[in-house]
């Protein structure tokens, strides 16, 4: 009669389990900071990429305006850019430091670019990007996940400030709070007076 031997599966000893736990803990300690660092790098690359695209868009708007011999409508600089009418900075006797030809939005009444509001900033954003990421000036929209808002916009000293949502500060309940200036979150600010786009990276 053939008898087969049944091998008993040997389990981990207590010492082996302790060693495994220690190794896993060591791997977690070394891997998590690297993962977090990669996440921060991705956030930085995101805002820098958007700022670069924004600056390029501003330059293309002005280049088209120049190529079309600086068109105007009712004494206001304007251009049809990719099917969208954009009004551009138009220096006046009271705004001589403003350079002409940079987008200020869809409002011809703000052609000197000295009274920018968040609506103007959103219009510039949507006007120069072919597929603009979602953006809002209402902090409640950022805390409503159903709206899927990626960027927040403010106006500070007549400059348009664009912030990456997940880099903004949060309150005790985990809700995003509105920034007042460029000292919070990853952001860039657009100055329509001279087309400058300045990126600021703030570590959380």
Image (cartoon, rainbow, N blue to C red):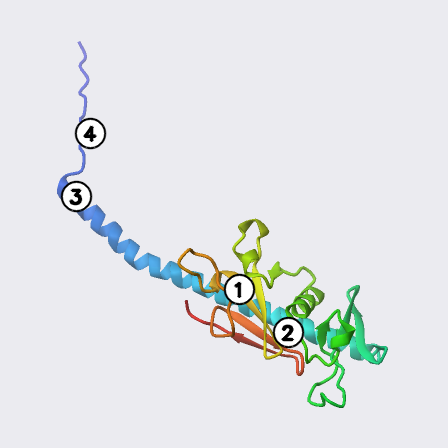
Which label's residue is closer to the chain start, 1 or 3? 3
Q: Which residue is drawn at 48% across and 68% down?
A: 185
Task: Give me the disc on residue 16.
Answer: 3
In the drawing, does residue 29 fall left or right of residue 200? left
Query: Is 27 located above or below residue 62 in the figure?
Result: above
Is disc 4 placed on a helix, strand or loop?
loop
Q: In which quarter of the image is the N terminus?
A: top left
Query: Is 181 located above or below residue 100 in the figure?
Result: above
Which label's residue is closer to the chain start, 4 or 3? 4
Q: Residue at x 71, y 74 (%)?
A: 104
Mark 2 or 3: in front is 2
Q: Do the residues labelled 2 and 1 touch (CB within 8 Å)?
A: no
* Circle 2 residue: 55
Residue 70 percent location from the top left of the image:
82, 80
Q: Residues within 10 Å of mark 4 (few under 14, many from 20)?
A: few
Mark 4 or 1: in front is 1
Q: How far apart are marks 4 and 2 (CA)?
A: 65 Å
Residue toward you, 102 or 9: 102
Q: Quadrant of residue 101?
A: bottom right
Which label's residue is closer to the chain start, 2 or 3? 3
Q: Distance between the residues labelled 1 and 3?
A: 46 Å
Residue 145 percent location from the top left of the image:
53, 51
Q: Residue at x 54, y 61 (%)?
A: 139
Which label's residue is closer to the chain start, 4 or 1? 4
Q: Do the residues labelled 4 and 2 touch (CB within 8 Å)?
A: no
Is disc 2 placed on a helix, strand or loop?
helix
Q: How far apart are marks 2 and 3 (CA)?
A: 58 Å
In the drawing, does residue 203 fall left or right of residue 87? left
Is disc 1 placed on a helix, strand or loop?
strand
Residue 171 percent location from the top left of the image:
42, 61
* Circle 4 residue: 9
């Amino acid at each position: 009669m053939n008898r087969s031997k049944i091998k008993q599966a040997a389990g981990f000893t207590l010492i082996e389990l302790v060693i495994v736990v220690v190794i896993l803990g060591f791997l977690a300690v070394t891997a998590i900071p690297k993962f977090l660092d990669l996440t921060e790098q991705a956030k930085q690359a995101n805002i820098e990429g958007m700022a670069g695209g924004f600056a390029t868009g501003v330059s293309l708007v002005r280049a088209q305006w120049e190529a079309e011999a600086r068109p105007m409508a009712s004494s206001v600089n304007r251009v049809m850019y990719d099917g969208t009418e954009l009004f551009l900075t138009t220096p006046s006797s009271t705004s001589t430091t403003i350079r002409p030809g940079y987008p200020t939005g869809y409002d011809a009444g703000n052609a000197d670019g000295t009274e920018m509001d968040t609506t103007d900033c959103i219009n510039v954003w949507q006007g120069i990007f072919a597929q603009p990421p979602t953006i809002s000036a209402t902090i409640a929209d950022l805390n409503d996940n159903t709206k899927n808002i990626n960027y927040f916009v403010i106006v500070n000293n007549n400059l348009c400030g664009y912030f990456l949502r997940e880099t903004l500060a949060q309150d005790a309940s985990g809700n995003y709070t509105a920034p007042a200036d460029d000292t919070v979150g990853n952001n860039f600010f657009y100055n329509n007076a001279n087309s400058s786009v300045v990126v600021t990276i703030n570590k959380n």
